[in-house]
Amino acid sequence: MHTIECDVGVAAIVRKARSILLVKEAHGRYKDSWGLPKGYINENELPSHAALRELSEECNVNGRIIGVQAIRERLLKEVPAIFIAYLVELPGDQEPTPGEEVSETRFVHADEFGELNWISDAMHSMAVSAVNSNQALQTIDYEPQQGHPYMLHTLPKTWGGEA
């Protein structure tokens, strides 16, 4: 196996009908811009776990990964940069509230997307895709069987009429 330096970012896409949970950045170069709850992975952390951690830190809710909605890849100063947007569901009646990194959290209807100042065109595209498609890679957590963090993201099982 060949190891290289890689920039890895993650986001959580939480859908409610034709709305997506978005956050308004409170600090930094994206202050007052809208985007998905997002961030970077820590050492010894799976990207999917980082997405849930970031969702919790930015929106004060706990979710469950149900799939991968989008992957963005690019070179950033000659280093591969990967960004994975996970489809997440919120069990129960949790209501998002802003954490320290964001000034606002809310479910934004797809009809309002064009009015927002987005962090990036890619993030805007991820949100549009999430409300316009029910297709995503399904996530299977094999950690209980493997005894260590182990996630598989694959096409949903449809062979033999099963979904």
Image (tube, rainbow, N blue to C red):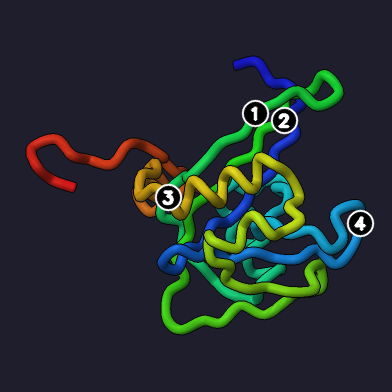
Q: Which class describes the residues within 10 Å of circle 1: few (<14), some (14-19), or many (20+)?
A: few
Q: Amino acid at mark 3?
A: Asn
Residues tagged 2 and 1 counted as in contact (Cβ below 8 A): yes
**Residue assigned mark 2:** 81
Q: Position of residue 77 (x, y in %)?
A: 86, 23
Give the secondary structure at mark 2.
Answer: strand
**Residue assigned mark 4:** 28
Q: Residue furthest right?
A: 28
Q: Position of residue 78 (x, y in %)?
A: 82, 19
Q: Amino acid at mark 4?
A: Gly
- The quarter of the rendered structure image containing the N terminus is top right
Give the secondary structure at mark 4.
Answer: helix
As measured in the structure, the alpha-carbon distance from the residue carrying label 3 to the one carrying label 1 is 22 Å
Residues tagged 3 and 1 counted as in contact (Cβ below 8 A): no
Of the image marks 4 and 3, the number of the one nearer the N terminus: 4
As measured in the structure, the alpha-carbon distance from the residue carrying label 2 to the one carrying label 3 is 26 Å
Residue 52 in the image: above or below residue 70 = below
**Residue assigned mark 1:** 73
Does the rendering let one see residue 60?
A: yes
**Residue assigned mark 3:** 132
- Say which of 4 and 28 sits in front: 28
Of the image marks 3 and 1, the number of the one nearer the N terminus: 1
